[in-house]
Image (tube, helix red, strand yellow):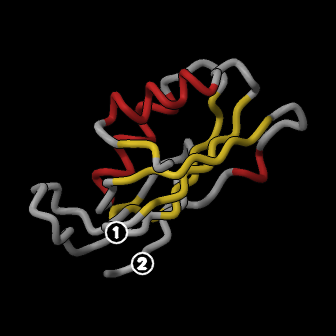
Amino acid sequence: MTEQRIDLGLSATTPVSGGCSDGCGCGAGGVASTPTTQNLTAQAATSELRVEGMTCGHCVRAVTEELTALDGVEVVDVDLHDGGVSVVRIASTGAASDDDLAAAIDEAGYTLAR
């Protein structure tokens, strides 16, 4: 099992060469970007979710897209643990509820770890 850290914000991203090994066909081994957490306002709250089933950069992008579509979500940061439980940190202005965050993870096709 390979452990990989992927930091995603709302900034442009640059694909990392290589492909994932789970056969999803994304052709991406991950995504590298500059974290934007230093740009958060003082009012931003953070949440941390443990997510099962993520294996590659495509998975990270799917979760990030669903979460950033929620009102108030400013930054999503993912510690990808290929085949294990990944940690997803969300910085928001509080508009998104815990139920909203859980529903976004489900919509992306992944499961919250218990």
Q: Which one is nearer the viewer's eye here, 107 or 111?
A: 111
- Disc nearer the start of the sequence (1/2): 2
111 relative position to 25: left or right? right
Count how many numbered circles sit on residues in the image.
2
Percent coordinates x, y for residue 14 in the rendering: 39, 60
14 relative position to 21: left or right? right
84 relative position to 18: left or right? right
Q: Which one is nearer the viewer's eye here, 92 or 50?
A: 50
Residue 17: which numbered mark, if any? Answer: none
Location of residue 35 with respect to 102 vertically, above or below: below
Instruction: Identify the amino acid type marked 2.
Output: Glu
8 relative position to 60: left or right? right
Farthest-out residue, front = 114
Q: Which one is nearer the viewer's eye here, 10 or 112?
A: 112
Q: Quadrant of the N terminus?
A: bottom left
Give the residue at mark 2: 3
Residue 82: which numbered mark, if any? Answer: 1
Query: What secondary structure is found at the residue carrying circle 2?
Result: loop
Look at 37% across and 42% down and name the residue there: 111
Look at 57% across and 46% down and name the residue there: 49
Within 10 angstroms of label 1, few (less than 14), some, or many (20 or more) residues? many
Quick check: marks 1 and 2 in contact, CB under 8 Å? Answer: yes
Farthest-out residue, bottom = 1
Percent coordinates x, y for residue 46 in the rendering: 74, 42
Query: What secondary structure is found at the residue carrying circle 1?
Result: loop
Look at 40% across and 41% down and name the residue there: 63
Spatial separation of the CA atoms under disc 1 and disc 2: 6 Å
Look at 52% across and 63% down and name the residue there: 79
Instruction: Identify the amino acid type marked 1.
Output: Asp
